Amino acid sequence: MESTFLFQPTPHEEAIAFIRNKPVVSREVFDRLLPELKARAFTITGLEGANAAQAALNVRDRIADLPAGGDWDKIKEDIIGEISPWLVDENAPEDVRAEQERRAESRAEMLLRTHGFQAYQAANYEVLNRQRDVFPAWEYVTAGDDRVRDEHAALNGLIVPADSDFWRDHYPPWDWGCRCRVVGVSNSDLADAKKEDEDRQPEERAVVEGEALRKLNQGDLVLGPAFRRDAPDDLRRLAGTQMDVRSPSARATTKSERDAAFQWNPATLRLPLEALKERYDAETWKAFQNFAQAQSLDDKGTTVWQWLGGSPIFPPEAPPTPPPKEAPDTIEAALARLGLDKKVQWTEDDVRALISELRETAPAKAADVVSEILGDNAKGKFSAKSVTGAVQDFVNFLPGPLAKSLPKFSILLAQSLGNDLEGSYSDTAHVLKISKSAHAKGGMVKVRETIYHELMHWVHLHGPPEYRDAIKALYDQRTAGEPLVNVGYTNPLRKDKWWWNYAGTQYLTRDETNQTVGGLEVPTTHVELLANPAKLANMIKEKPNALIIENLRVILSVFFSK
């Protein structure tokens, strides 16, 4: 059947859940949250004392009625009623009271716009992020009225690559009261926009790339003299100027200013606790952990630390159940039972016997881990049935509690991923992509290899931190003294003695430290061989030093158990 995509940002149930699952916190607690967590919490400045917490809770839940179809004006009126006892003095002089009422209305508008619009945009981001192969670029669009700020108006109509750093702190709403939005740009629309740009000066082009993109990522935007010819007169003054479009946090010069600045990045809403920890130095993280473990959020004694739970916040999920600790010799015992513990070469029958031994007796179901499949064909290797079967084969290796503790992922069967890429897994969007064109001539075994490879990223990146520690130790041991080289891949690698040198790939971290990380392809490149017993047996035969077996023994002992 034809591919199914959501072309409108309408996942209202997710938007409702996003708002209702924000814990109501005091301003003191809110100020001490890490920047990435503030978008997940709810607070109202100025509400203190008796019944303040209940009033804030009522306001939060009333805002959640907006994506459920509630009337904007009626919701705002109810919010004004909830917060007015703290903001309006009924005994004040008439002119003073009128100003207080105006401020209460303004506060209600801001709360409704910030949290309600934030929920819509978070849901919209989820849709666009899942469909980057369909919408490789995103267009920035303002509300188009005289209330749009200059630095927002300057961005109107710009088309920026979906994977650009620009969106890390400019995805709406990226400042208080921001009403801008983002629209996906298809490959054909992107080509049309570039064609229209051919007759324009670089600073007048809609598609931002090259040097202009580099400057935009730094917050610099030069506007050509033809900028926004159809804009209102009061915005035409922007033409021919150089704008500072940095986000509020980027403009801040001190830590206190950065902490107080508006910060919003929908990509971090799925940020696990371990990934959050990696963004901070040990001292800062320890201080936050001490605060979070001691600070209660409600009268039930729920702490900030328990709220985080190490699990994604959007969409809401139950905290993962930690997988049971297994004895370290379970894989060794399996190898011993099969007589493979001392063999330096394995036959195809040996491999099949080991695979059978690794299968769980009570594994999770594919439906427990796959949220949806997009782009499937009715029959063949790209049908939902075939792909689900391959996923089930992989999940059969995992202990049930472990598989169910990992985040659900969607599968996108795309026509092409570009650069002959066979597959990919996004640890932020939780999307497994498979290229149909790259597998057009191969059979289901090749598709299965790709699924095994990418799902090992899923287990490796979202599983317990000791998984990553063990693989990092294996990588460091295998590559000790090896130089970092480029051999034609996008990223450099350390060759060592892997069966495929791609296993030695190093990546740059996504954060501002740009540190290299190795070992991410070690489990993926080895476990994919389990999808093809004949290939694994042949690879072992070609490596008489038995390094493949040694690596597999470590990897299997880390990830799989009986």
Image: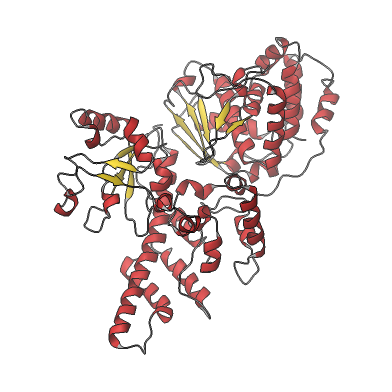
Quarter assignment of residue 309: bottom right
Tell me the residue at 40%/33% (across/down). 3
Q: Nearer the viewer, residue 157 or 77?
A: 157
Image side of residue 69 versus residue 315, left or right = left
Image coordinates for residue 388, horizontal then vertical, percent: 56, 33
Instruction: For the N terminus, give its image quadrant.
Output: top left
Q: Is residue 449 above or below residue 538?
A: below
Q: How many marks?
A: 0
In the image, is 138 to the left or to the right of 513? left
Residue at the far front: name it: 253
Which of the 4 image quadrants contains residue 199? top left
Residue 216 location (% of width, % of height)? 34, 40
- Residue 74 location in percent, x, y? 33, 71
Camera-nearest residue between 51 and 176 = 176
Q: Is residue 356 above or below residue 288?
A: above
Depth check, front residue: 380 or 40: 40
Quadrant housing residue 494: top right
User: Going by the image, does 69 lie left or right of 558?
Assistant: left
Quick check: 29 above or below 133?
below
In which quadrant of the rendered image does the C terminus lie?
top right
Whether residue 186 can be seen here: no
Residue at x-position 32% and y-position 83% = 97
* Display colour scheme: secondary structure
On the question of residue 208 being in view, the answer is yes
The image position of residue 364, as x and y in percent, is 66, 40
